[in-house]
Image (spheres, helix red, strand yellow):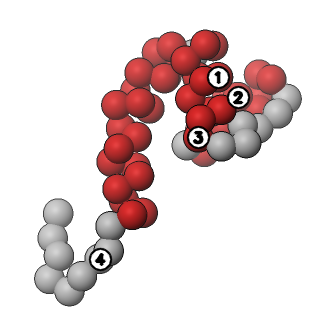
């Protein structure tokens, strides 16, 4: 997400306020980048929503 925000900031001069705005901008201005990020977004979200437990493995 940080790289997406950098590209958006570099080209527009502002940062998206949230994921929804980020995805809207990516879809409109950077469709190839949007496709990659959209594909991986569920993995990104699950990485900070899951509880890590002893004995947990990938």
Vertical comparison of 32 with 10: above or below: above
Callout 3: 10 Å neighbours few (<14), some, many (20+)? few
Residue depicted at x 77% and y 28%: 10
Give SS at disc 3: helix
According to the image, label 2 marks what residue? 8
Residue 5 in which image quadrant: top right
Give SS at disc 1: helix
The mark nearer the N terminus, 4 or 1, is: 1
Q: Position of residue 17 (x, y in %)?
A: 73, 42
Callout 2: 10 Å neighbours few (<14), some, many (20+)? some
For the N terminus, the image quarter is top right
According to the image, label 4 marks what residue? 52
Evaluate if marks 2 and 1 touch, with contact meaning CB atoms under 8 Å apart.
yes
Give SS at disc 2: helix
Residue depicted at x 41% and y 30%: 38
Task: Between residue 4 and residue 45, name the one nearer to us.
Answer: 45
Residue 56 in which image quadrant: bottom left
Q: Position of residue 25 (x, y in %)?
A: 64, 22
According to the image, label 1 marks what residue? 25
C-alpha distance separating marks 4 and 1 = 33 Å
């Amino acid at each position: 997400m940080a790289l997406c925000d950098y590209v958006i900031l570099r080209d527009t001069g502002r940062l998206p306020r949230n994921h929804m705005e980020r995805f809207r901008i990516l879809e409109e201005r950077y469709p190839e980048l949007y496709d990659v990020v959209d594909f991986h977004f569920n993995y990104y979200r699950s990485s900070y929503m899951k509880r890590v437990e002893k004995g947990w493995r990938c």
